[in-house]
Amino acid sequence: MAFRLALPQIQLVDFDPEGVLLIRGQAGSGKTTVLLERAQALLRTYPRATVLVLAFNEALSSRARRTLGAAVAEGRLEVRTLHDWAKTLARHEGVQFPPGFWADSTTRERFLGNILKRPSMNIQGTRLEAWTVSQWSDEVEWLIGQDIQSLEDYLDTPRRGRGRSGGPGREDRAKVWAVFEQYRKELSAKGKHDLHDILGLIRKASEQSQKPQPQKASFDFVLVDEVQDLDLAWLKAVASIARVGTTFSGDFAQRIYRRHFTWKAAGIELPPARSRFLAGTHRNPRAIVALAQKVLGEADPSADTGFESPSPDAMLDDGQDHVYFIQHPQVREARKRALLHAVDCWKGGRDVVIAVPFRRIADESIKVLGELGTKAGFLQRRDLADRDGAVLPLTTFHQMKGLECEDLVLLGMEDDLFPGWFLSDLQGAELEDKQAELRNLLYMIVTRPRRSLTLSMGGKVCRFL
Ligand SMILES: Nc1ncnc2c1ncn2[C@@H]1O[C@H](COP(=O)(O)OP(=O)(O)OP(=O)(O)O)[C@@H](O)[C@H]1O
């Protein structure tokens, strides 16, 4: 590590290893750094302990592996995504994964589409008839994510959490439940498993091993990054792994998916003394933090999870302006200028990333860059985390979660595109929920760069800026 940890960070690295610790903090405050340092400190203190680091996705597990290289190589510590861990566990217990085992959202929608055509589902003539397959798929994902096991549970579960306000009324839930049960039955009959259903997979492994806790399910210490984006069912799965202590880190202002949990519902005791906040940023210059604060506005993503807005203290400040707006009445021209700026940075050997709200804009931009003689590529997952400058990287906002770069260029900051495109057809509480989620997404993405942020927009500027 090229720097010394600050005192509040050291205190969290060394914080009592037994029980639960939650490390909260604003973007760039060093949550992941502290989490990974803590994993190493635990190994130093308890050389025979088993340690599992759960990263949110492949890009972040790649970052963690790089930092924890030696311990991973020696087999003293495992770094996995939650999905990967559940899969390894299930495989160890003899669960088979034949081709086509996983039902992703496209497969889920196909199954649901077929089920919904059947008159026996009794949807005709109800409000549910107006639902799109993608709304059905969202509701199924919510049922899985909240670990709802019966119609009674479904009727009793409050519609809490962002993105849930528009759920079906009580009178329609029995019908939704029938569709959900049918989906599960048909999926199982075809030997498939819903990709979102991690807890279900672990339960399958338990049944197979005929033990309450399958072998290899436990580690002495578990450290979980980006906890804000876990679903309740995932958190329940995680909560049962550690024999001694679990450390979570996360920032609820960066919750960018429609998922929700409460610690209590997951069976996790979290006394206030064990929920610690890291203030300040070690990543962003002052101008970027100021913009990030504006983006977040008055948002309160979740009162029960202890959100705090970014602090103006401890920002990096070298007296320069690091936020650039590229505005032009024509979107195409604004984008071209922003792309040329990115090319300049890239040719100057800087670690620049271009991020866009939709894949389509990335593909169009790669074409434009090709015409300008620059080799650009769409990168995601590990390729993005391990980028080496061979191509000028483009990616979507979500892919940059937990990552950082030197310079960031954002395309598509026109209001009718971001957030407008995502909000069409929404009203009332659902509209507000979605807006809040997109604010978080924009907050996350604008806080990625260490040096400069460039935003391109043609026409009306994104309302969050
Ligand atoms: N004490 C420190 N001194 C200097 N740099 C630091 C310090 N702590 C962390 N950093 C650096 O600051 C950056 C942000 O750290 P990190 O990614 O751990 O923050 P985070 O809170 O997890 O961020 P985010 O929530 O935005 O993903 C990294 O480049 C990290 O190396």
Image (spheres, rainbow, N blue to C red):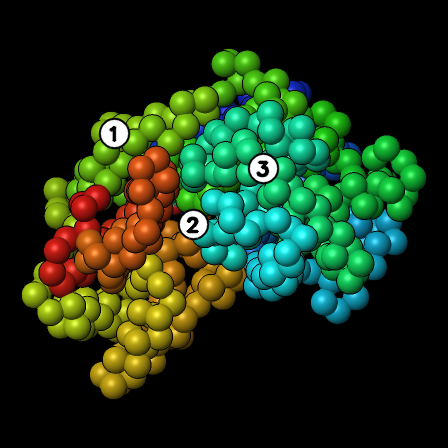
Question: Which residue is rendered at x = 61% and y = 49% of the image?
Answer: 122
Nearest the camera: 11 or 149? 149
**Alpha-carbon span between mark 3 and mark 2:** 34 Å
**Alpha-carbon span between mark 2 and mark 1:** 22 Å
Relative side of 163 to 147, left or right: left
Whether pointer 3 and pointer 2 mark residues with C-beta atoms closer than 8 Å, the reply is no
What is the residue that sits farthest to the front in this orientation? 125
Which amino acid type corresponds to the residue marked 3 in the rendered image?
A: Arg
* Disc 3: residue Cβ within 8 A of ligand 1's nearest atom: no
Q: Which residue is mark 3?
A: 173
User: Can the viewer see residue 272 in this picture?
Assistant: yes
Q: Residues within 10 Å of mark 3 (few under 14, many from 20)?
A: some
The quarter holding residue 371 reads: bottom left
Location of the C terminus (image quadrant): top left
Q: Which residue is mark 1?
A: 298
Q: Which mark is residue 401?
A: 2
Question: Which residue is rendered at x = 54% and y = 45% of the image?
Answer: 139
Pointer 1 or 3: first along the chain: 3
Which amino acid type corresponds to the residue marked 1 in the rendered image?
A: Glu
Residue 255 screen position, x and y as percent: 42, 39
Q: Is 331 placed above or below 127 here?
A: below
Label 3 SS: helix
Nearest the camera: 332 or 216? 332
